[in-house]
Image (spheres, grey):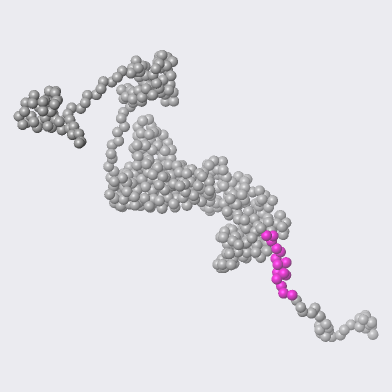
Amino acid sequence: MTKPRRPSKVELYAAIRRDARAGKSERELQRLHRVGWRTVKAALDSAWPAPRAPYPQRPSKLDPFHPVIDDILVADLDAPRKQRHTVTRIFARLVDEHGMTDISYPVVRAYVARRAPEIRIEQGRGQMDVFVPQTHLPGREAEVDFGEIAVRLGGALVTCHLFSFRMSYSGKAVHRASATGGQEAFFEGHVHAFNRLGGIPAGKVRYDNLKAAVAQVIGFSRQRVETERWVAFRSHFHLDAFYCQPGLTGAHEKGGVEGDIGRFRRNHLVPVPQVDSIAELNELIDRCDDADDHRRIGARIRTVGESFAAEQTLLKPLPVEVFETGRWFTPRVDRYAQVAVRSNRYSVPSRLIGRPVRVLLNASDLTIYDGRTPVARHERLLGKGDARLELDHYLEALVRKPGALPGATALDQARAAGRFTPLHDAWWAGARKAHGDTAGTRALIEVLLLHRHLPHHQVVAGIAAALTAGALTADAVALEARKSTDGNPATAAASTNVDTTQPVASLTVRRLGHLPADSRPPPSVAAYDTLLRRRPDPHNPPDRQAST
């Protein structure tokens, strides 16, 4: 037999009020429901029971030390940020200076955690963080920021910078990776975003106070001293900039792009991508941006792509003129055929030594001009104090100094980049063995000069064919390389199936070894004697015949 359930207090109040309406007196209600007169009176006053009164707070051993802790927390408001009291320091001072005993560290920590924010508010130093929901108009507002990403570039783990341009209404974001986060990358990211979006936001674009745009923050106001190139860039694209407050407070003013960089990094760059160049990385990022058009933000009904299609027609058109996002420099070529740009060195053709050149520095590469003629192009280095050298730039000098080639830094970089292949090394070793070190190295330099006129794979195919035939001259490599332009599959196969570990045979020995045996009799010239008009008499010299 189950015990009847005891009614809840709400049900008891409802029963008392029901019986009271039926005409029962308060004494009958007390006897019927087995309650006191206070319960009957409370039920008749309100249908909902009053909340239970809280228990009175028990006194604590820490109560005498509350004023001391409060004074310490108030004094910390004006102390240097790195020299303020920690809970451990407060506990130690209470023990050493005020004789506190029998009080544990967690009790002090709990009181400090509760009182510290209250004291900041009481002293007018802090306020509760309130986030006000915002409504963005289509095609008018956007946010910009930079972030860092890790990439395996050419097998090495490096840190690149990720530019993000996010439309506030639709959440459509365009990203661009670069070697640095300088002004070149800042401008190039904008131009790439405008081209991808098909227009420019008609309203304000929110920025933090990055050095690419802001030269000086004026006090605690919104006024900024902008850099000259940024002023020209904004004027060219009719861009209206809005600068957020410095620090963490300003980050909340453009929270959309702050969260977008982390989201993009977690969803598209994990695991760490492996690429050979930053251009390849940007192609990957563009595909990821296209894929994000199909995602939904929160509980929105439309996808990002559908929302952006509604605001794309409201964007301002792009200007017809092109704005140069790179920066120009005019360094002088040193005796090592190098120019210094932003703490790094890049090679140029050796014929330009001692002459000034023009360098166009972009976000991820740089182009070097002799007058108006481009003479070199390099991918931008990520670190400082490094050098990027091209072996082709030193070939004319190496013709005069062939002994400098084996230890050349440009040769090591060409090997690491895969442009100087094992086939080059095998052909070079054979040429030095056949012609000597100096002549063999010069022959290799003539082969390397072929790369200026023929594609790399054709020259490699020509070297492979020359190795197979035992031809160790630059003319033979050039002939075989031009043959490969016909698309002969046998030549292409030879470029990958050559055994470079075997010694190279002489071309003459190889040809004589493949000739058939000659069984013909030795040649005779006796038949030519009949063509002579008169044979000379050995017993009658010509002088005696003439005297007779």
- In the foreground, 186 or 24: 24
330 lies left or right of 547: left
Q: Give x and y (percent) for residue 485.
A: 56, 66
Task: Tell me if residue 185 comes above or below residue 80 in the rendering.
Answer: below
Query: What's drawn in magenta, residue-wise?
Result: 502-517
Q: Quadrant of residue 490?
A: bottom right
Residue at 70% from the left image edge and 56% from the top image edge? 432
425 lies left or right of 527: left
Task: Tell me if residue 131 comes above or below residue 442 in the rendering.
Answer: above
Residue at 14% from the left image edge and 23% from the top image edge? 36
The C terminus lies in which quarter of the figure? bottom right
- In the foreground, 304 or 451: 304
Q: Which residue is most to the left?
A: 23
Q: Is residue 546 visible?
A: no
Is 480 magenta? The answer is no
42 lies left or right of 409: left
- In the foreground, 529 or 24: 24
